[in-house]
Image (spheres, grey):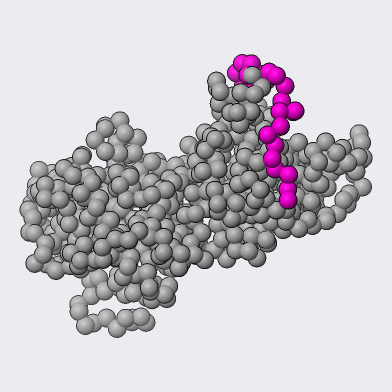
Amino acid sequence: MVGTDDRSTADVPDWVRCERCAVLIYGKRFLRSLRVCPDCGWHSRLTARQRLALLLDPGSATPIRHVEPMTDPLEFVDSRPYTDRLLDARASTGLREAVLCVTGRIEGQPAVVAVMDFEFLGGSLGCGVGAQITEAARTSLRLRLPLVLVTASGGARMQEGVLSLMQMAKTSQAISELDEAGILVVSLITDPTYGGVAASFATLADVIIAEPGARMGFAGPRVIEQTIRETLPEGFQTAEFLLAHGMVDDVVARPALRGTLGRLLSLCSPRDRADGAAADRPDTAGPTGDEILRQLEDVTEQDSWEAVQLARHPDRPTTLDYVGHLLDDFHELHGDRLADDCAAIVGGPGRLDGRPVMLIGHHKGGPDLAERRRRKFGMPEPAGYRKAARLMRMAAKLGLPLVTLIDTPGANPGPAAERGGQAVAIAENLRLMSRLPVPIVSVVIGEGGSGGALALAVADRVLVSANGVYSVISPEGCAAILWKDAEAGPAAASALRLHARELLRLGIVDGVVPEPPDGAHQDHAGAAGMLGAALAAAFDELTPWEPERLLQERRNRFHRFGIEAGTSSGRGAP
């Protein structure tokens, strides 16, 4: 067993001075707060053993096989021989290398865990670290267990020269094997994580979580400032900066880490637990047949303009309102991994009636005007669609059914969106959704505006709420262009045939989700119950299908649009 119980007070003085706010903290209080400053929230560094004691269930750690690396391939000497530095690091930390790798459990969930230790030569990436990270990934692959990486590193180990550089490629290849095998990888970024570690396995994970204040980047701040001869802004490269710029999924304080990781592990590794997932679902009454209205006579005729007003009602339940009612253990994931996190798209894994799913949706922000502005009124920029695409790929890798909730006036029309490649981002999503090998159910819960809506709606089952609308353009936009009069919106709405009954007649949607008698905006809980029942009914139909059938039926569904009945010959038709 690995010695992970690090609750001794021997290494903590009676008083500790916070490195950020300089307040004095009573040593025992510092330990009780998990070495976090109770005044400013500064997270002190932990050793690898301290980190394992924090994250793993007591007594669950078992070391994985140690791979013996080349010790001193360059026979490197600076002011001291490299071999002397290695001996000192091993003596001071009790570790053989700058990473400690074990199998264990987090909140009862089995995983392979690799924890780096900054006290061992600055957590530098050399042949030894590369060998152990690769062995951890291979152990994860062999046991089909999720891999959790905890990073702390100043970069590549210079004393091993270009061989240390090669470890970036070696560890990245190891992660790619887990991608191919559909095995979850989670990174926990701790302070600091730089250079070769940041530019390889640390940022290739499916989910990247960071401790508050943790810094991550390729080049360190001193190098950047010396190169550009400018002072960097406050908070540059911190976890909070990275979250705002789409590089990490979440910032989680130390006391919440074990619970957060445990929930993610339980949600995101269902591929080998298909039988168990069904068993975990609560006993509910079977489907009654009216969860989804599929016949025209069951759907009430509406005035098109009235339907538009109801679809836009500011009190209609938002995606996050529905999430709150329908999903257990939902964890919102952030960022496009390129440059931004668009708040108009939200998404993450959760449990729908016991079934692990990935949910992605437009989010207008509800009735509060300031929040609606922050959410861009539900009109995503390219970063939003790229975030959605990232989560879709994650769902495909892990075998998670996909739910998309659509409520947008359309894609963001601003110049920043155009500079960011709005058209390309939408097109990429249309292609990606066409080939995702998992069941997809899309529901227009409010407005379905043009390509901005379709970018989340290439699905096996497309549904619309009873008071939802779906159109190629807004009625006002259509009126301004064709009627030359924006006031002709009601006439345009009628001509566009955009309400639920017409959408069902045209075959654009496969069914209509009922709403409470006075509308979803009057009864969020009731609307959520009806939506949940419809989603469960749709997934019950789709779950038995093999990926090949899902893909073929999805292609056929969209191939039929615009072709007279009987003229399509299906796959291979010209």
Q: Quadrant of residue 115?
A: top right
Q: How many marks on residues?
A: 0
Q: Which residues are magenta?
A: 1-25
Q: Is residue 284 left or right of residue 240?
A: left
Q: Residue at x 57, y 49 (%)?
A: 106
Name the quadrant of the C terminus.
bottom left
Q: Residue at x 32, y 50 (%)?
A: 326
Q: Quadrant of residue 87?
A: top right
Q: Residue at x 63, y 19 (%)?
A: 25
Out of 414 and 501, give the one closest to the viewer.
501
Out of 124 and 386, give the one closest to the viewer.
124
Does residue 149 sit above or below 13 in this rendering?
Answer: below
Q: Position of residue 417 (x, y in %)?
A: 38, 44
Mark yes or no: residue 494 visible. yes
Q: Is residue 77 left or right of residue 277?
A: right
From the image, give the main secondary structure of the stretch colored magenta.
loop
Does residue 562 sit above or below 494 in this rendering?
Answer: below
Q: Is residue 197 left or right of residue 276?
A: right
Q: Quadrant of residue 28?
A: top right
Q: Residue furthest top?
A: 23
Indicate yes or no whether the magenta region holds residue 348: no
Indicate yes or no whether the magenta region holds residue 5: yes
Out of 245 and 210, give the one closest to the viewer.
210
Q: Position of residue 122 (x, y in %)?
A: 75, 37
Q: Residue at x 49, y 54 (%)?
A: 266
Q: Is residue 358 left or right of residue 532?
A: right
Does residue 356 sit above or below 261 in this rendering?
Answer: below
Out of 33 and 547, give the one closest to the viewer.
33
Mark yes or no: residue 419 visible. no
Q: Position of residue 5 (x, y in %)?
A: 69, 40
Q: Position of residue 362 (x, y in %)?
A: 32, 48
